[in-house]
Image (cartoon, rainbow, N blue to C red):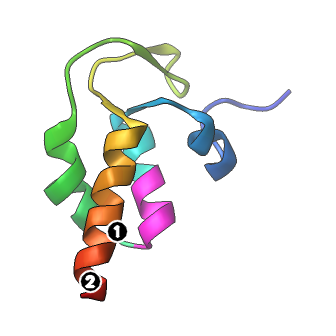
Amino acid sequence: MKSRNRLTIDELVQLEVFTMKEAQVYVEELTGMKKSMFYDCVRPLLKPKPIARNFRTQRPGHLVVKKSDVDWIIAQMKSKVLE
């Protein structure tokens, strides 16, 4: 049986809501940036709602962010870099 302490990038893409750690891994995988983009851009979007399950600890994630918000931030940052 597969351990749930680490999600693959394919499993992260399927999620609608990320916990803080899942959002950090998702941003690092898509952008290649280590923590800087996450802490500057995505972390302020985190909201204190226990609506997602943290698979590592099997408890509700207390800080969550919508996947659509994270994708929007990533697209916005990439467009600024390309200009």
Residue on which the image places disc 2? 81
Is residue 43 at all visible to an observer of this figure?
yes
Give amino acid for label 1.
Lys
Question: Up-down: is 30 above or below 68?
Answer: below
Of label 2 and label 1, which has the lower sequence position?
1
Quick one: quadrant of the C terminus?
bottom left
Q: Residue at x 20, y 45 (%)?
A: 43
The residues colored magenta run 26-32
Residue 42 image offset from top left, x and y in percent:
24, 49
Residue on which the image places disc 1? 34
- Marking on residue 23: none
Give amino acid for label 2.
Val
Residue 26 image offset from top left, x and y in percent:
47, 52
Question: Up-down: is 62 above or below 11?
Answer: above
Q: Local crowd at mark 1 within 10 Å, few (<14), some, or many (≥20)?
A: few
Which of these two is toward me, 55 or 71? 71
Q: Examine the residues drawn in magenta and state their main secondary structure.
A: helix
Q: Residue at x 19, y 38 (%)?
A: 45
